[in-house]
Image (tube, rainbow, N blue to C red):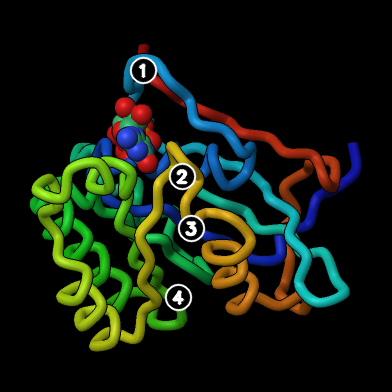
Amino acid sequence: MSAMRVDAKVVMLGKESVGKTSLVERYVHHRFLVGPYQNTIGAAFVAKPIQVGEKVITLGIWDTAGSERYEAMSRIYYRGARAAIVCYDLTDSSSFQRARFWVKELQNCEEHCKIYLCGTKSDLIGGDRSLRQIDYHDTQDFADEIGALHFETSSKTGNNVGESHLQSSLSNCVSAEETGVDLGQKKDSYFYSCCHNN
Ligand SMILES: Nc1nc2c(ncn2[C@@H]2O[C@H](COP(=O)(O)OP(=O)(O)OP(=O)(O)O)[C@@H](O)[C@H]2O)c(=O)[nH]1
């Protein structure tokens, strides 16, 4: 088996059930999994090659478990991350408090990590605006204050997840010259070591 080089580490953070795994599924596999919610245990990894200019670089995405009982473990996964996608559920104000917690952690411990604030499940508020609990402009102000990028996504519809938003933002913050990490996997193959509860 030939070695796979990961050019940049990306970590998904956020309260449980905000939709981190769904965002990764949509981004990497272009699908939305239906069925009962299965919380992530520990963390899962997937490699995603992306085109940056004329080069292909490989993102190593760590999808952490949102449950607070795995908080210590999540800290391990953001170490050395080039980008953090801090997710909150647009219909759950408590998830935004948790997002602020992760932002503070990153600011204190990973000052070079680019932060992306991602409001998830935008399809739900599209159908019923009264379900929105997080104001777009307040979040944009917060994003400006901390120097983060901010976007609202739907993994269900794919809104803002594709090349034009999430991917182009990520590709702007990485370069092919990053030092690689040998993960002992074949280049260009995705692998996703999911640890899901049934
Ligand atoms: N309507 C809608 N539901 C979503 C969306 N994204 C996720 N969900 C649902 O929200 C629930 C939780 O999604 P997950 O992706 O497993 O959440 P998670 O943040 O990975 O959760 P943990 O593993 O516990 O940290 C599931 O039932 C998903 O189907 C979305 O964009 N729209």
**Amino acid residing under circle 1:** Asn
Whole-percent x and y of residue 87? Answer: 32, 55
User: Toward which corner of the image does residue 115 lie, by quadrant?
Assistant: bottom left
Q: Is residue 138 visible?
A: yes
**Disc nearer the start of the sequence (2/4):** 2
Q: Looking at the rendered structure, which numbered label has been put on residue 23? A: 2
Label 1, label 2: how far apart the Cα atoms are: 18 Å
- Tell me if label 1 and label 3 are in contact, CB under 8 Å: no
The residue labelled by disc 4 is: 113
| Viewer-nearest of discs 2 and 3 | 3
The residue labelled by disc 3 is: 160
Q: Considering the image in quadrants, where does the N terminus appear? A: top right
Disc 4 element: loop
User: Toward which corner of the image does residue 106 lie, by quadrant?
Assistant: bottom left
**Disc nearer the start of the sequence (1/4):** 4
Label 2, label 3: how far apart the Cα atoms are: 10 Å
Q: Residue at x 52, y 28 (%)?
A: 194
Label 1, label 4: how far apart the Cα atoms are: 30 Å
Please tell me how many numbered marks the rendered image carries: 4
Label 1, label 3: how far apart the Cα atoms are: 28 Å
**Amino acid residing under circle 2:** Leu
| Left or right: 140 as drawn, with respect to 9 | left
The residue labelled by disc 1 is: 197
